[in-house]
Amino acid sequence: MPLDMILGAQWGDEGKGRITDLLAVKADITARFSGGDNAGHTVTVGSQIYKLHLIPSGIIHPHTLCILGNGMVINPERFIAELDDLKKLGVDISPERLKISRAAHILTPAHIALDGAQESQRGGLKIGTTRRGIGPAYVDKAARRGIRAGAMEKPDTFARLIREHVAAANKLLERIYGQPPLDAEAISARFHQIATRLKPYLADTGSKIAEALEAGKTVLAEGAQGTLLDIDHGSYPYVTSSSPTAPGALLGLGIGPSFLQRIIGVTKAFQTRVGEGPFPTELTGPEGDLLRGTGENPWDEFGTTTGRPRRCGWLDLVLLRYAARVNGFTELTLTKLDILSGISPLQVCTAYSCNGLSSPNLTDTPDAIGSYMPVYTELPGWAEPITSVRSPDKLPAGAQQYIRLIETETNLPVRMVSVGPERDALIHR
Ligand code: GDP
Ligand code: IMO
Ligand code: MG
């Protein structure tokens, strides 16, 4: 005991990596459970900035075992590149402390080519994916023709499966999408070498997690993406292809809910989104630019994975209440509160209106939010910088009022407030 979850409450990039790094200090295991290298998690330790895509953020702490769970889709070439980058930074990436579930699915260059081809074909209706092959990899999983990581135990068989998979994808690429075929032989040969290197990382990760929990150890589930990108509960079809929510964490780790303790919803103090899809509180003018930043600071709102500018807007408590319902959050963590210093007044969406009727809760699934108008509660804000504040009562009155509004409106405690990207820029409440 226990299992704690760190989950994105919005459209991703809430600061899950930064919070995982903080809580991993006391975790025996840190595990990713869904998605792949579409995730980009930034951890800042002094002058060192770590950018993690597949490997859990706990890797930076030498004591924690890191797991890539069965719910993930893993591009092994990206995994190796990430291993090598971390090694250069002095991080221990030995197979003793990093395990890949044998049931996780392998993502290949064919999935990436299909993702790109499908996005191009969608034209104006594109989803704005990260083009990392995520959707096509989950399609193969659901179609029961995917290749699982466990196949790397036998590199010869694995190489054959990869060759056949690329040859099959080539038919789609050429005949349906008019794209050039990929070199199945060359990819197969590369993946043979990869299998030989990655074999020692394979494990039955579900039983490792279960044993740890039964022995009284702490397991941290590090979410990727966010609730509103969930394939079932997000703003479909502008979503990812996995389940980044609390039930998805159990599914993607291979354990039941009995050890569950904290379900932490991480939300920014405002709203951001990369890619297409509805965004009721979006600010397209200078206020949005103010929230986004110019790109000069590492924490400005430009994607960790794709470098795309993130769309920015006011905090949406209707959607946060929805995320709390879907995940069963037990608490909230508020990140990037420092960015709101000096912005006055502040608006927070506390209801949606449609045809003259206003409602505090979503009355439909989130794919319909494009037709709602946000109803705002205005707050005065605060002028002073807060990055060096470490205790809740030292926050300016306007910031305390902002946090209280979130707590009242969601009926959840905000137990951590992040006021900067650095490890120690945090207020416990
Ligand atoms: P994740 O995908 O949820 O892990 O979030 P990202 O790493 O993609 O994006 C969050 C960005 O905000 C990163 O650049 C973090 O370093 C940064 N960040 C996190 N918390 C804070 C904070 O409280 N203040 C500031 N200024 N930056 C933060
Ligand atoms: P982290 O873990 C923000 C978005 C993409 C696109 C949609 C589908 O860093 O919070 P995909 O490539 O998954 O098929 O793209 O999902 N998306 C993310 N947005 N943060 C992420 O991860 C994301 N992962 C996917 O921009 O809109
Ligand atoms: Mg991110």
Image: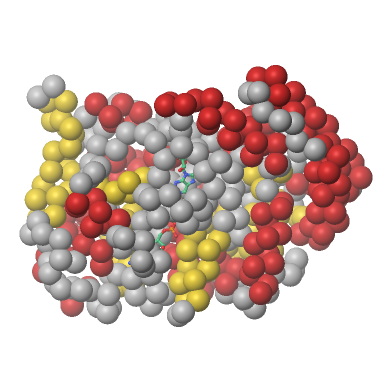
Q: Quadrant of residue 188?
A: top right
Q: Is residue 35 above or below residue 401?
A: above
Counting labels gives 0
Tell me: 242 left or right of 379.
right
Q: Quadrant of residue 205?
A: bottom right
Image quarter where the N terminus lies is bottom right
Residue drawn at x 80%, y 30% is 167
Q: Is residue 171 above or below residue 426?
A: above
Camera-side residue of 404 and 78 = 78
Percent x, y for residue 203?
Answer: 76, 55
Tell me: 198 left or right of 400.
right
Camera-side residue of 224 and 251 = 224
Residue 132 in sight from this viewpoint: yes
Percent x, y for residue 344?
Answer: 10, 59
Q: Is residue 125 above or below residue 318?
A: above
Residue drawn at x 40%, y 55% is 302
Residue 263 in sight from this viewpoint: no
Residue drawn at x 83%, y 44% is 186
Percent x, y for residue 407?
Answer: 22, 55
Camera-side residue of 324 and 160 = 160
